[in-house]
Amino acid sequence: MGISIALVGDYNKAVIAHSAIPLALKLASAAVEVDVNWSWIETNTICNSDNLAEFTAIWVVPGSPYTNMDGALTAIRFARETRRPFLGTCGGFQHALIECARNLCGVDDATHAETDPHGNSLVVTPLSCSLVEKDGDISFTPDSQLYNIFKGQETNEKYHCNYGLNPEWKTRLEKKGINFTGFDTEGEVRAFELDEHPFFIGTLFQPERSALRGRLHPLIKAFIEAASKSFNTILSFTPYNGIRF
């Protein structure tokens, strides 16, 4: 019996990240020496947290807009509130910020410009320059979780996105425990982590792509290590006296 990872998103074999993720998990599994099982969970199958409870950790994967945005947000909230290890890459990064805006900042209509361009509370908006099939250098805030994962080193990562954090929301989210700790060479936000959570990390870049070159990525290794450590705790934990959300 090993740890189990819910890959939340709408699988599409044409999406490069979706082909890379199983390879990345296999590399991390071997490095950590733990059995890792994973299942793709389509967003339109998530009405509440019931079909997520069996999983050790949650990875909300690239490929937005999702078929069911509320399903993706439910999975993110479930990981955050049950303290399950969470990784959100690309679209997962974007939607984790929306979930926090809705449920930590109390802004019910917080949303994404890709799906609701005229929304009143746009947490995720178009980037000043497209990052579709681009790469770039990223540095991390000293003493942050990501800084430690990368051993204080900068990293060069690949992207496939046109949307990122609306800068107008940065301070408001920071007041609720979101730490923006990864930045490109222009100082633009590229990663965050959540205070007082064992492992809740979002990256606009796609670390899984390193597996296409046969390289173990330190962030995915750290995600699997966190899942392994939390496995026994999760088995005995029931959030909010069993209340579903």
Image (cartoon, grey):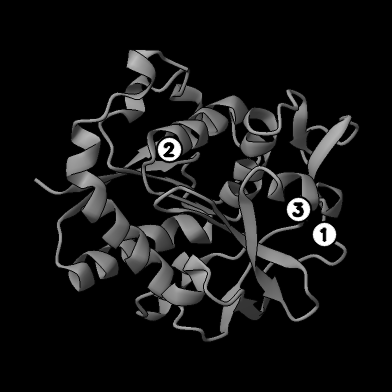
Residue 42, above or below 241: below
Residue 191 location (% of width, % of height):
62, 62
Q: Quadrant of the N terminus?
A: top left
Residue 52, above or below 15: above
Q: Are marks 2 and 1 in contact (CB under 8 Å)?
A: no
Give the residue displayed 80% in from the left and 47% down from the top.
169
Residue 25 in view: yes
Q: In the displayed orientation, state which residue is furthest to the left.
A: 1
Q: CA distance from mark 3 to mark 2?
A: 21 Å
The one nearer the camera, 162 or 111, is 111
Circle nearer the N terminus (3, 2): 2
Q: Disc 2 marks which residue? A: 79
Q: Disc 3 marks which residue? A: 165
Give the residue displayed 42% in from the left and 68% down from the top.
219
For the image shown, how many numbered marks are present on the structure?
Answer: 3
Locate residue 229 relative to residue 45 in the image: left or right.
Answer: left
Q: Nearer the viewer, mark 3 or mark 1?
A: 3
Q: Quadrant of residue 21?
A: bottom left
